[in-house]
Amino acid sequence: LKSLLKDPTLLRTQAYVAGQWVDGEGGKTFDVTNPARGDVIAQVADLSRAQVAEAIAKAEAAQKDWATWTGKERANVLRKWFDLMMENQDDLATILTAEMGKPLAEAKGEIAYGASFIEFFAEEAKRIYGDMIPGHQRDKRIMVLKQPIGVCASITPWNFPNAMITRKVGPALAAGCSMVARPAKETPLSALVLGELATRAGLPEGIFSVVTSSSASEIGKEFCENHTVRKLTFTGSTEVGRILLRQAADQVMKCSMELGGNAPFIVFDDADLDAAVEGAIMCKFRNNGQTCVCANRIYVQAGVYDAFAEKLTDRLKQMKVGDGLEAGTDFGPLINEDAVDKVNEHIEDATSKGAEVIFGGSRHNLGGTFFQPTIVKNVTQEMQVAQDETFGPMAPLFKFEDEDEVIAMANDTIFGLASYFYAKDLSRVYKVAEALEYGIIGVNTGIISTEVAPFGGVKQSGLGREGSHYGIEEFLELKYVCLSV
Ligand code: ADP
């Protein structure tokens, strides 16, 4: 991997604690593998719980000073950090693809997307406005201050190894908090390189640490039980989100949770069908189906059902599965064998209940964790995929007759992150957008992610929002000062 980088010093395998590069206790490490080839590409420091506690203590010491910096001073460092990410975009993307598998072009896109949160929140650092409220008595003045929460901890998944971290760190640091980040053990290298660039940008020691560890549950416990940590921000499954919320309850810790989705993607008969097919490709198959906003259930109105299925099949035929580091690859491997099992399980469950595979349907002949992009027809609400996120390249096509029916089916889930629909009729657009119980709605588009908009879910998809001016509020406390004059 080093030989593929323009700047090989960006590849870091020690943990990044308060500006220092540290080994795991007793030199302990864990392996990072390239999912496209199955080979070990790095051995990364495996920190103990006690080492993470030390990182938290250092984050506390550093944060006290950081909070006194002016917004503009913090903004300047963050802006420098952003610039360095973009200057090293190619190397960051190569590292990301090597450990995670997504095609290089997508990885580059993720670096730009991830960096955009640092840029955006650098700008927001200067705009953390408080409030003056007219007093309730003649002698009273009421001031509302916004202050950083303090030391924050993050736990992030492997599917966006860069952006899931920057989306949390950007607003936290802009607000005057410090952050101890625990990246997924599958993708620590993309997190560690952010530490290297943070040092180069002049971020004070301790404001950002990357605590790599193979034991997520141990670190999760430390984050929740350590009284210095004031805020936990998590992206991952609803299942783990629930565990963390329970643990965090003991010290009433503030939590932001970006959890699972089960996104419906609805194609009405008045939709621009070609646009809907393109949207479905982007939305279902981006990152090989491994995003929490990927379409999980594709509902197509009866009149255009067969035409949509045909067009989608034709489009998929043009796409290439392969090693993400090779040019021309559209879909990389899945992250691991469990991911392959899940896709197989959903396909088998659907076909055993009467659905029909019309494209793909099994492992790819490249072997490993490569899987064929798959389309399944005649899928119904009784099948597993209707309730459970596939997180893989299987597009299940459900048929529906009318608006009310599809709204009911789309909302029939415990999740409420992203949803999408294609339609032209204006009153239908309003009605459906208002009726879908989701935090994010894409209308005639399959791509909704941007740093300037609030990202987050309702129901069991999470708590809080990331990105946009709303995102920084998650890292601020309100303080009410009542002054008698
Ligand atoms: P995914 O399927 O995306 O890996 P998970 O929710 O399993 O979703 O994992 C998201 C992140 O949470 C990963 O970094 C994982 O290591 C971590 N994690 C898993 N279990 C726990 C736990 N009990 N406590 C804290 N973190 C955990």
Image (cartoon, rainbow, N blue to C red):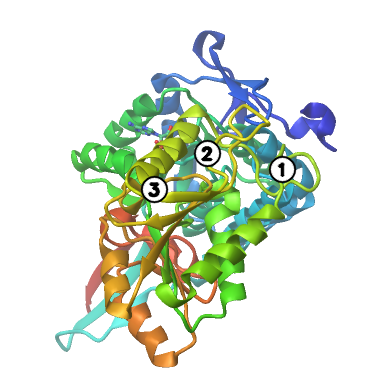
| Figure quarter occupied by ligand 1 | top left
State the quadrant of the N terminus: top right
Q: Residue at x 69, y 34 (%)?
A: 98
Question: Mark 2 or 3, which is nearer the eye?
Answer: 3
Question: Mark 1 or 2, which is nearer the eye?
Answer: 2
Q: Residue at x 27, y 52 (%)?
A: 382
State the quadrant of the C terminus: bottom left
Q: CA distance from mark 1 to mark 2?
A: 15 Å
Q: Residue 366 location in percent, x, y?
A: 68, 31
Q: Residue at x 39, y 22 (%)?
A: 49
Above or below, 254 against 12 in this view is below
Looking at the rendered structure, the secondary structure element under dot 1 is helix
- Residue at the disc numbered 1: 92
- Residue at the disc numbered 3: 389
The disc labelled 1 sits on which kind of residue? Leu
- Residue at the disc numbered 2: 158
Looking at the rendered structure, the secondary structure element under dot 2 is loop
